[in-house]
Amino acid sequence: AGAIGLAAACDYLSKIGMPNVERHERELAQRAMDGIKGIPGVKFVGPESSANRSGEVTFNIGAGSPHEVALMLDSLEGICVRSGVFCAEPAMNFLGVPNGAVRASLYLYNTNAEIDLFIATVAKVAKVLA
């Protein structure tokens, strides 16, 4: 069953075209980053350009813990993100965020409307935590 499911997923992505998947992810990531970069208290972890990222946006808000931010995004609008050190504690220490960060992972099924909701909700959270 696993092999059949994997083959179906590969066929699906081949029909869409991986360059199209990558382009969509980068466009969504750039939209999200452009939308939250001006929000007081938001600080990116890693590059601030989608050209140097995959479909993810990693950030912190003010003095709020990453877990606090994740819980607020979920409770306000059902936005699910990862929070913590992502099994990469040495990297987080190197990047200067020993308590970790919040990561929104974007993919083919995400839409511009969802990114706009994400931006608006990050702004609400920042008003409380920044």
Image: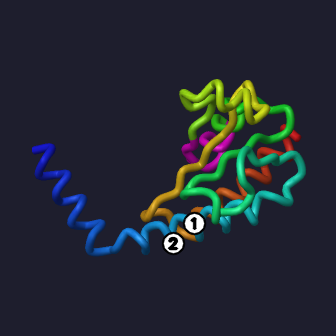
Task: Judge whether residue 113 can be spotted in this image.
Answer: no
Report x, y in % for residue 94.
Answer: 73, 31
- Residue 23 is marked as 2
Q: How many marks?
A: 2
Q: CA distance from mark 1 to mark 2?
A: 5 Å
The front one of 119 and 108 is: 108
Does residue 77 belong to the magenta stretch? yes
Relative to 112, residue 100 above or below: above
Report x, y in % for residue 67.
Answer: 66, 30
Please, what is the three-letter code of the amino acid marked with disc 1?
A: Arg
**Looking at the image, which residue is at 55% across and 44% down?**
80
Report x, y in % for residue 121.
Answer: 71, 53
Relative to 123, residue 99 above or below: above
Report x, y in % for residue 60.
Answer: 76, 40
How would you classify the magenta stretch by its main secondary structure? helix
Name the colour scheme.
Answer: rainbow
Please, what is the three-letter code of the amino acid marked with disc 2?
A: Arg
Please state the extent of the stretch shown in magenta in the rendering.
72-81
Q: Which residue is mark 1?
A: 26
